[in-house]
Image (cartoon, rainbow, N blue to C red):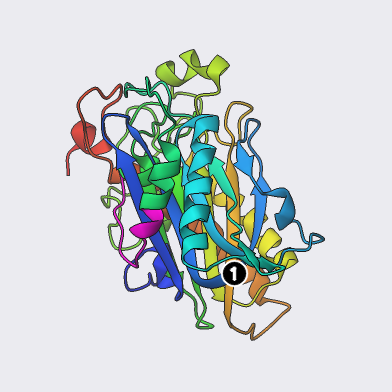
Amino acid sequence: MKAGRRNLITDVAGLRVGNAGDEALKSGCTVLVGDAPFVCAVDVMGGAPGTRETDMLAPDKMVQGVDALVLSGGSAFGLDACGGVADGLRAAGRGFEVGGIRVPIVPGAILFDLLNGGDKDWQANPYCALGRAALAAAGEAFSLGSAGAGLGATTATLKGGLGSASVVLGNGATVGALVAVNALGGATPAGAAQFWAAPFEVEGEFGGRGVVAGGDPFANPAADKLAAMAAGANTTIAIVATDAALDKAGAKRMAVAAQDGLARALVPSHTPYDGDLVFAVSTGARELGNPALDPLVLGHAAATCLSRAVARGVYEATPATGDILPTWRETWGG
């Protein structure tokens, strides 16, 4: 398995990612934007999702191209980040044209980070401005770990974070993943440095600690997370992308397959208290060589990339004043 040049979702040509966050707030957002509108679908498996404009992504709905996607902290307040992105895109002349008016199409999803120790006593919702700032910062390179939508994320026993990974397939297609890891479950077994995603690691991208031997999937106590269950204080939200040409139905299948990547990297996943969700994006730059086989390969690659991205998000997290959980590196070094 060969990662792309940056080992980021932006190895899919034509995609850019921007982060914005507030350290005092301990929250932020991440924007994925295309040089041109892209095909998009979504799959939701968690029991507590928070979304904007996802109904239109169904294969039978009219709009075929999306201008940007938003992953944000802030629970329902974070959906305002989509409005900030839409404002910025409209100012740039982007959007679906209706009678001479441009309407940017900006679906989004949020995670719950309101109980992570940050100052949430705002007078005005900060997420609209964060969304516009993230759009302005969008580029091919971006930070992982405690950045953007992963700034205040947590898992069962460690800080979460923003992760990304990519793979270049034998047929020439590129697949990438971007994820904000804020799970009820854990990315590592209890008391172990190894990641559940270790079988898929590429060139020591999350520490090279190898595969855990005999990890107990029932042993993660998730004490802080369990105490916050009633508030739904979780959710892992992700985007997988490819340059292979897919229609909305094909992108939907890739999103469904990519959910396996969350299940392989987070234990447990897709719980009633998570809003686990995966968007799938196709830029359409590369025609399928084998329409019967390539969608299977793309789905498998998306799942594998997403597992790696989850581990990278937790691995790259950094400590900050007021944190309620330690980082992986504080706990295990490296």
Q: Is residue 195 visible?
A: no
Locate residue 115, reporting x and y percent. Answer: 41, 20
The residue labelled by disc 1 is: 38
Point 66% across, 41% down: residue: 45
Residue 279 quadrant: bottom right
Relative side of 112 to 201, left or right: right
Q: Nearer the viewer, residue 103 or 289?
A: 103
Any part of residue 192 in sight: yes
**Residue found at the far front of this picture:** 100
Quarter of the image that includes the C terminus: top left
Q: Nearer the viewer, residue 27 or 251?
A: 27
Above or below — where is 80 with respect to 288? above
- Work out which residue is located at the far right of the displayed protein and give it: 60
Question: Mainly helix, strand or loop, the magenta region?
Answer: loop
Q: Residues within 10 Å of mark 1 (few under 14, many from 20)?
A: many
**Image x and y of residue 159, in percent:** 33, 33
Q: Is residue 249 left or right of residue 325?
A: right
Element assignment for label 1? strand
Magenta-highlighted residues: 134-146
What amino acid type should be assigned to the residue bearing mark 1?
Phe
Determine whether, in the image, residue 291 is placed left or right of residue 93: right
User: Which residue is depicted at the point 73% across and 54% down?
Assistant: 56
Asked if the stretch drawn in magenta spans residue 142, the answer is yes
Instruction: Identify the residue shown where x is 66% and y is 44%.
Output: 44
Residue 294, above or below 300: below
Residue 166 highlighted magenta (yes or no): no
Location of residue 300 by image quarter: bottom right
Placement of the N terminus among the 4 image quadrants: bottom left
Location of residue 321 in the rendering, given as x and y in whole percent from the top left corner: 20, 26
- Residue furthest toward the left? 334
Please state the total of marks drawn on the protein image. 1
| Image coordinates for residue 204, horizontal then vertical, percent | 27, 57
